[in-house]
Amino acid sequence: MADPSSYRPRPGEIPDSPGVYRFRDEHRRVIYVGKAKSLRQRLANYFQDLAHLHPRTRTMVTTAASVEWTVVSTEVEALQLEYSWIKEYDPRFNVKYRDDKSYPYLAVTMNEEFPRVQVMRGQKKKGVRYFGPYGHAWAIRDTVDLLLRVFPVRTCSAGVFKNAARTGRPCLLGYIGKCSAPCVGRITPDDHWDLADEFCDFMAGRTGTYLRRLERQMAEAAEEMEYERAARLRDDIGALKKAMEKSAVVLADATDADLIAVAEDELEAAVQIFHVRGGRVRGQRGWVTDKVEEITTGALVEHALQQLYGEEKGDAVPKEVLVPALPDPVEPVQQWLAERRGSGVSLRIPQRGDKKALMETVQRNAQQALVLHKTKRASDLTTRSRALEEIAEALDLDSAPLRIECYDISHLQGDDVVASMVVFEDGLARKSEYRRFQIKGFEGQDDVRSMHEVITRRFRRYLAEKERTGEWADGEGLADDARHPNGDAAPNGDAAPNDGAAPDDGAARTDGRGLTDGQELTDGPALKDDDGRPKRFAYPPQLVVVDGGQPQVAAAQRALDELGIDDIAVCGLAKRLEEVWLPREDDPVVLPRTSEGLYLLQRVRDEAHRFAITYQRAKRAKRFRAGPLDDVPGLGETRKQALIKHFGSVKKLRSATIDQICEVPGIGRKTAETVAVALARATPAAPAVNTATGEIMDDDDGAPETTADAPGEPVSAGTPDERRGQER
């Protein structure tokens, strides 16, 4: 715990102007970002007597080790910079709305030659019109199914569209009248684009025009005794009215507005948003947040507005935003919203009429969401706290391990040896901190050596980051093993060229931007030189857990000892009897089976095992898919597919002459000679045998053959369950 007076700026250093400030902890990680009309007045509030501070503010200033600020010209610039830094640094003491799902939108891709109607989530794209968000994807599909009778816009994927255009046959929707079938030329691109534009107008609330037009056409068809056409138009009108009934009118005059309500108590706050477009509720969403700082309702509203409109532009920001309390001051927020929309935005509290009545409905939804959240989470908070306390007591730790890292080794009979690192903070998985490693220090199966290598690489990186940020005391430095042979600190925190985070080493991660199992970590924004970001190896754990018993624990402790690290606890969890092993102890620590601490350790261990084995299986599958053509220099995926398509299989390609290979479009004589040499050098795989019939399976189906460098999995390797049992 730091004394705020130790890093308090001297009098006169803080400017009396608008700006944004950041508090950092002892590891240089940003823990709080704030803005102020006057930096001098705002920061002075943090350095008063601790007894006068709110408990959460007191915790923040005692956790911090330094404060810095950036001066801007206006309060609007301060608001924009604050939003950018909160998004970039993810500070632990800032209000963070936890959206428990990705809300789906109805999207129309008006940027394509043939616009497509579909369900979309995630980041919005330029040239696509969005409607929503909706609570459920099925609600969008039900609405679209009704509207396709009147607006038969394309809904198929690019692959289905191209296949239909190639074969000249539309899909089922084209036959039943729910698609105008532009893929086979039943409608011109311009007419189909106009049809999609009409669909967007209807979804935007301009419904009366189309209903009146259809009713007029129905009457004309009846007068001309075209009763079948009149009946079809009658059904279309019914479908449109049914789609409109799904979102009843709540505000007159086709109002476009967002209504935001907040329900809060001393610890948490729930935010609910109703999106009203054309006077109808088009979508609803909600967030819940921990109040980790002393904050007013107006400030909660301001943070909600940043979260809601920080990435939006144009019509996505409505003309009117109704809130329960106004930010203080309100002018910069209102100006910021106007800049994002491109025109004026009214930010106000509804006082009377339909808007106030609807705001009361939104408020009831927020209150119900908060009650439901507390019902679900109350026991969870208590359980996690008890689990951490039990672990600290069982392992004789000075304090509860708020950050736990767990490591596991995975392989299949010694092949494709990989390791995983998962992170739990406050008893919850923090997936953005996960990492994966390829074991390259040696060949073969040795879990103990693998564990030593992974722990060494991970904490070598930690020491390098610590030295780079200047946290070493005078005379300190990296341990000898953490330096290059010439004595210089390794640029990536490892003595060998293959660091745990270098692209050629295979360390990988997952984060909020979408990296998932099997994707490699590359140098780039995730490893920027600017410190303070939580996407690096620079933040140490209080406890390292390894999947295994005494040997694995001893290897992990030996790695830390070699690096001179003595302030991180190590333990291992053995699968057989769920025993907890400690370094240099002959007997394990046995936690009761009903212990919440044991349950948390099991959950951490199982998550590390899942993460490791998923990566190992992905690597193995990739290796098994490799073929002799993969090693041909200059032969890309397109020409490989062209060769296989032309000859039908690798076996037939191997028997072809160079002149026959040259007949393939895009293959010159030099490339053909290279392909022929590569196939001649490759060892043909042994024929696969169907164990049920004894039949020899030929490879004429076009499947890639395996080589001596990438042996395939034998057919008779046992049942899938038996093979899974061989994996670690």
Image (spheres, helix red, strand yellow):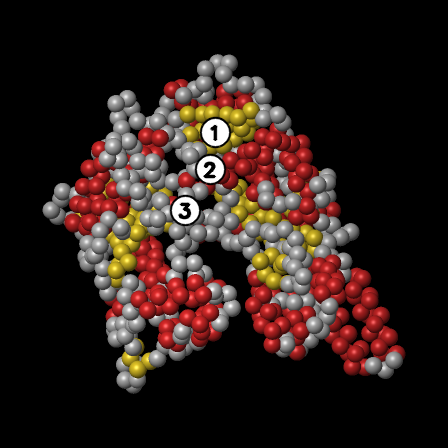
Q: Quadrant of the N terminus?
A: top left
N-term-proximal mark, 1 vs 3: 1
Q: Is residue 381 visible?
A: no
Q: Kindly report the distance in space between the C-alpha atoms of the residues bearing marks 1 and 3.
A: 28 Å
Residue 25 % position (x, y): 39, 30
Residue 724 % position (x, y): 28, 66
Instruction: Give whichever of 702, 262 is nearer the camera.
Output: 702
**Mark 1 belongs to which amino acid?**
Arg
Disc 2 is placed on an element classified as helix
Location of mark 3 (residue): 522
Disc 1 is placed on an element classified as strand
Image quadrant of residue 617? bottom left
Location of mark 1 (residue): 22
Looking at the image, which residue is at 54% across and 33% down?
82
**Mark 2 belongs to which amino acid?**
Tyr
Relative to 234, is 484 on the left or the right? left
Instruction: Give whichever of 219, 489 is nearer the camera.
Output: 489
Residue 309 % position (x, y): 61, 43
Image quadrant of residue 493? top left
**Mark 3 belongs to which amino acid?**
Thr
Residue 711 % position (x, y): 28, 66
N-term-proximal mark, 2 vs 1: 1
Above/below status of 181 relative to 611 = below
Disc 3 is placed on an element classified as loop
Looking at the image, which residue is at 59% across and 61% down?
119
Location of mark 2 (residue): 89
Mark 2 Cα-neighbour bin, 10 Å: few <14, some 14–19, many ≥20: some
Q: Is residue 230 visible?
A: yes
